[in-house]
Image (spheres, helix red, strand yellow):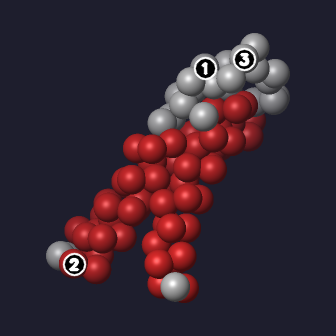
Amino acid sequence: MIPIYGLYWVYKWPRELTRFVNSRFHAPLMRPERTGLAVFLAFMVFLLLDRGFAMILLFWVASHRSRWLRLALEMRPTQPQGPLPFS
């Protein structure tokens, strides 16, 4: 059960990070499903195919997410008018 839960968190934490970034902007800029799926795919490529290519994918996903997180932390929090479409 613990390895399956570990796979769940590989998908879950990028989604939560994306929701945090989207909550700081007026419009949703990142899709939670796509960011979680990108990290999960990099993890699966690491396990099943090529570790070097998986590390490149993971670095690309992490740098993309880091850029948006940096921009979100520089902004002041906004109050959404309604529910976000990707939340």
Residue at the outermost top position = 81
Precedes in sequence: disc 2 or disc 3: 2
Please indicate whether residue 17 sits to the left or right of residue 75 in the image. Answer: left
- Asked whether the residues under the numbered discs 1 and 3 touch, taking CB atoms below 8 Å apart as contact, a structural biologist would say no
Instruction: Using the image, tell me which numbered label, if any, was put on residue 27.
Output: 1
Reply above or below: 12 against 1: above
Q: What SS does tag 2 mark?
A: helix
**Quarter the C terminus occupies:** top right
Pick the residue in front: 36 or 60: 36
Residue at left offset 81%, top offset 29%: 77
From this viewpoint, is residue 74 visible? yes
Give x and y (percent) for residue 59: 40, 61
Which residue position holds label 3? Answer: 82
Q: Say if mark 2 contacts mark 1, CB within 8 Å.
A: no
Q: In whole angstroms, how far apart are the C-alphas of marks 2 and 3? A: 42 Å
- Badge 3 element: loop
Circle 1 residues within 10 Å: few <14, some 14–19, many ≥20: few
Cα separation, mark 2 vs mark 1, equals 37 Å
- Residue 46, above or below 24: below
**Which numbered circle lies on residue 50?**
none
Q: Name the residue under label 2.
A: 48
- Tell us which disc is closer to us: 1 or 3: 3
